[in-house]
Image: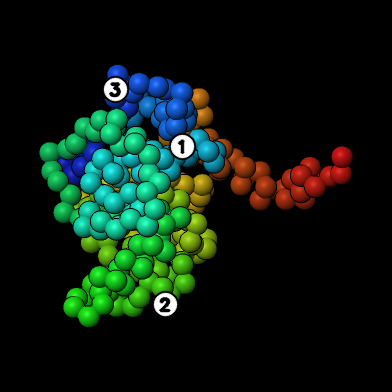
Amino acid sequence: MIDNQLYQYIRSVELNIEGVEDLDRYPFCLDAVLRLQKLVLHPNVTFIIGENGSGKSTLLEAIAVAAGFNPEGGSKHFNFSTKDTHSVLANYVKMTKGVKMPQDGFFLRAESFYNVASHVDDLDEGTTSLLDAYGGKSLHEQSHGESFMSLMINRFRGNGLYILDEPEAALSPTRQFALLTRLHALVKADSQFIISTHSPILLAYPHSIIYHIDNAYHETAYVDSEYYQLYKMFLENPERMLTHLLEEE
């Protein structure tokens, strides 16, 4: 493990369940929320995996908002809102913070990255050189994958807390390998990441912990993770897998 103990900006998160009046209402009915006791984070990278609908994105949003980020994404200085759809979970999340404050940070969520790119353009119009921090070119003038890598390379400066919700959604496998390289450089520059993902490529990053959400939070080794096992099974014998998947009833 890279020695980032001093620069672990968030050490743990937990649900303040005593303040919740109705555990059956959204978002408290989600597994990722209801099972959130004390989740100890890795000083470098914490991965959260699980099925769609388990609440991974809701959890990351709550952590981000509790840490001071805009619920739609961006840095702590972004205060735009296109639609108020974020949950109240951030009000019930208790975070144990480290001794140092991050000097940089960003909350990335794939579903609202278009809105973040538009806000960057709005801020840049006429008076600032904000785009210089994003590669000198509007994020809208780049492909989704290019704009995200531009963000990682130019905007993420290190000494930061970076919360990424399914970053692989914009990236080809080749770009995911490039993301691993950049992520490692930022970790060595005293950064901490919290990432939800379905990507077996990203999950391979060694200086990390993987939590799988089902009816609880389970720490799992990379090779034991469901995503690794499924991809391995398919790539080792695609014909057999396809025969099973596509056979007629």
Residue 225 vs residue 20, the one in the foreground:
20
Q: Quick check: 34 above or below 136? A: above
Identify the residue at the far right of this view: 249
In which quarter of the view is residue 20 placed? top left
Which mark lies nearer to you, 3 or 1? 3
Q: Nearer the viewer, residue 138 or 196?
A: 138
| Above or below 35: residue 198 | below
Q: Residue at x 35, y 75 (%)?
A: 138
Q: Position of residue 41 (x, y in %)?
A: 31, 36
Outermost residue on the top side: it is 18
Query: Hey, what amino acid is under mark 2?
Result: Glu
Residue 55, numbered circle: 1
Spatial separation of the CA atoms under disc 1 and disc 2: 32 Å
Separation of disc 2 and disc 3 at Cα?
45 Å
Q: Quadrant of the N terminus?
A: top left
How crowded pointer 1 is (Cα within 10 Å; few <14, some 14-19, many 20+) is rated as many
Res. 49 in view: yes
Q: How many marks?
A: 3
Per the image, label 3 sits on a secondary structure element best described as: helix
Residue type at mark 1 is Gly
Residue ranking furthest to the front? 83
Please name the residue that numbered disc 2 is placed on: 141
> Whole-percent x and y of residue 237?
72, 48
Identify residue for label 3: 19
